[in-house]
Structure formats: structure tokens, C-alpha cells
Image (cartoon, rainbow, N blue to C red):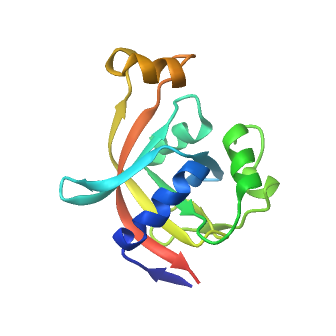
Amino acid sequence: MYREVDYEFYSGELLKQLPKGVFLNTRNGRAANTMTIGWASIGIMWGRPVFTAMVRPSRFSCGLIEKTGEFTISIPICSDFSDELLLCGQTSGESIDKFSECNLNAMKSKTLETYIVGDCELHLDCRVLMKNKIEGDSISLEIKNEHYKQDDFHNLYYAEIAAAYLIE
């Protein structure tokens, strides 16, 4: 069912899908959520494979990450999830169960307590190593004016990729 893969081999697939959106999944006890992200990076930091996710503090998922220090990334490779990604990017998990609303299969991740979107092919289990909040005076005016009109600056979560796997 879970087949471990080399995240580097699939990083191109991830980078190709990011502009269309990927699912970031969080869970704390019975509270679970999935949201769409389109801004992230993948690389090596501190000699470890790291996925850096951007999540605004105003998002329901942010509080769940803060409590658990973990999240998963579910990446559709062959399937079209455009409607689901749209809904999960525009609706808060505080008001609806997005897994149910979008008819997404919430499966336990391979190594964490957080769910994955089992309908997607590729998954990353991520444990937060460091958080950094974007400050308004530390970002270019061009980016600030284009993406932060409300001054709702993202938190950057630098997370070690604990596992990369396909669902078969």
C-alpha cells in the first residue's frame, strides 16, 4: 500500500504541481484539516531533506501545525483535483470538514498522526524543525503590495521530510 520513494526523484513532479496546488494536511486529535498551498520549496537544510511550507496564521491549519509540529503534503500526479483544491483553498476547516465535503479519502500517514489525502499518488510526511514569521519590513515592497494587502504575513515552516511514498 505505502511504497517508499526517493523524494528527490519526485521533486520535479511536486514543483510542476505546486502552481496548481497541493494539499497540506494537519490533524490534532479529532480536529483534522486539509488546505491548498501553492507556495513552497524543497531542498536541503542542516544536512536534511526539508519541505518549507507557507501558512498564514489566520488559517485553521496553522493552529494545528503549532500544536503538533507536523503536517503531510499530498500531491496529485495523474489525477485532476482542481475543484477540490479550489474549495480547500477558499474555505476554512473551522466551518466544514473538507475531507467529507470534497469526498477525499482521509488516510493515516505512514509515519505521523496526521492524515494524507489517500486519493493522491505522492505524499510527504513532514516534521517541523523551525518556524519563521515573515515580517512586513523584511519583504520587498513589490511582493508585499501584490500578496499582503491585509498584512496577513505567512509563517514559514521548515520541516524535515520524514518519509516520501506513493500509495499503490
In this view, the residue in front, 74 or 140, is 140
In the image: residue 132, left or right of residue 121: left
Q: Position of residue 139 (x, y in %)?
A: 36, 22
- Say if 134 sits above or below 162 in the image: above
Residue at point 48%, 61% (across, down): 14
Screen quadrant of the C terminus: bottom right
**Image quadrant in which you'd find residue 164:** bottom left
In the image: residue 50, left or right of residue 119: left
Q: Position of residue 110 (x, y in %)?
A: 49, 72
Q: Position of residue 60 (x, y in %)?
A: 61, 37
View extreme (left): residue: 47
Residue 73 visible in the snapshot: yes
Residue at point 72%, 46% (across, down): 86
Residue at point 51%, 67% (across, down): 123
Residue 51 visible in the snapshot: no
Report how many numbered discs are placed on residues in the image.
0
- Say if 2 sits above or below 28 in the image: below
In this view, the residue in front, 80 or 124, is 80
Screen quadrant of the N terminus: bottom right
Q: Position of residue 29 (x, y in %)?
A: 59, 53
